[in-house]
């Protein structure tokens, strides 16, 4: 499909016609395999990724190999945090990394910035994203502060399953530990407990939610 057809198919109910035309004109259609970095930390945000299909993961990184999972991006979404960095012309403090095969439209930041003035549908889109993603982060902070690790792991698996629309979560124990910023041994111990309770079935680099 051409970019005009994709924009019309996926975003006509979200944006006004003139904005759809600008997305088609200035956007670059891209495809990425799993585990590809779309936006890196300590880089100026030159392109905003508007997800068409697939799932991407937003992580907070310090540039030294340390990081924590924040939330997912799926079809017809982008990162409100990345948009904020772009508007303020600041370097990114997050990494956006593909979770699956992803098709997205990369839009130059200077073009996106002008849309806040020109298009009410873009402002509404941003505020909705910001509200949803902020609510998720607040909930995540609450879980870290007040919930046991078992609850956090189950919730992580359920969220991953939901955004991918698949009860099979293709993850190593190390991947989960890294995203949740806990030890791999703790994750393995809890997953084994959950398997005994028939909540999950463990396989090689995969976890099936029963």
Image: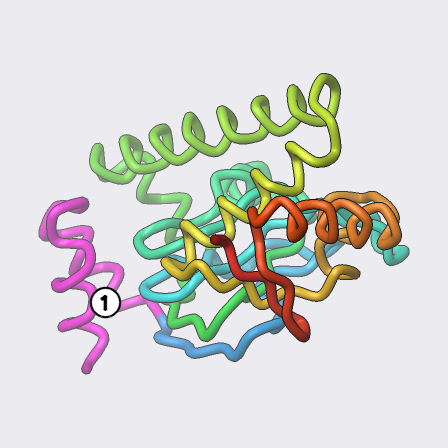
Q: Nearer the viewer, residue 73 or 110?
A: 73
Identify the residue position indicated by label 1 in the image. Answer: 24
Q: Which quadrant would residue 190 be assigned to in this image?
A: top right
Q: Please name the residue shown 17% across and 56% down the image.
A: 20
Q: How many marks?
A: 1
The kind of secondary structure element at disc 1 is helix
Q: Please name the residue shown 39% across and 67% down the image.
A: 104
Residue 33 position in % (x across, y down): 52, 79
Q: Please name the residue shown 12% across and 47% down the image.
A: 13
Q: Can residue 20 be spotted in the picture?
A: yes
> If the image is split into quadrants, where does the N terminus sit?
bottom left
Q: Which quadrant would residue 7 be assigned to in this image?
A: bottom left
Q: Nearer the viewer, residue 76 or 167?
A: 167
Residue 134 position in % (x across, y down): 51, 27
Q: Nearer the viewer, residue 3 or 186?
A: 186
Q: Indicate whether residue 106 is drawn in magenta.
A: no
Q: Which colouring convention does the figure follow?
A: rainbow
Residue 64 position in % (x across, y down): 90, 55
- Give the magenta part as a residue range: 1-27
Does residue 168 appear left or right of residue 141 in this picture? left
Callout 1 crowding tier (Cα within 10 Å): few <14, some 14–19, many ≥20: many
Q: Nearer the viewer, residue 123 or 77?
A: 77
The residue at the far bottom in this view is 1
Does residue 111 appear left or right of residue 144 in this picture? left
């Amino acid at each position: 499909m051409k970019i005009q057809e994709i924009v019309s198919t996926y975003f006509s109910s979200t944006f006004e016609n003139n904005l759809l035309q600008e997305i088609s004109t200035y956007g670059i259609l891209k495809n990425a395999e799993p585990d590809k970095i779309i936006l890196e930390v300590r880089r100026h945000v030159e392109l905003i990724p508007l997800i068409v299909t697939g799932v991407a993961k937003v992580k907070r990184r310090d540039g030294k190999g340390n990081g924590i999972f924040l939330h997912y991006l799926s079809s017809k979404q982008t990162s409100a945090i990345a948009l904020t960095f772009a508007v303020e012309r600041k370097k990114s403090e997050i990494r956006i990394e593909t979770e699956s095969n992803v098709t997205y439209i990369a839009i130059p930041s200077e073009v996106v910035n002008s849309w806040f003035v020109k298009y009410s549908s873009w402002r509404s889109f941003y505020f909705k994203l910001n509200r949803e993603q902020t609510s998720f982060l607040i909930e995540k902070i609450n879980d870290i502060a007040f919930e046991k690790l078992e609850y956090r792991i189950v919730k992580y698996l359920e969220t991953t399953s939901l955004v991918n629309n698949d009860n099979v979560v293709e993850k190593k124990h190390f991947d989960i530990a890294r995203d949740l910023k806990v030890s791999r041994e703790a994750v393995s111990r809890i997953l084994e407990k959950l398997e005994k309770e028939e909540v999950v079935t463990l396989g090689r680099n995969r976890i099936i939610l029963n």
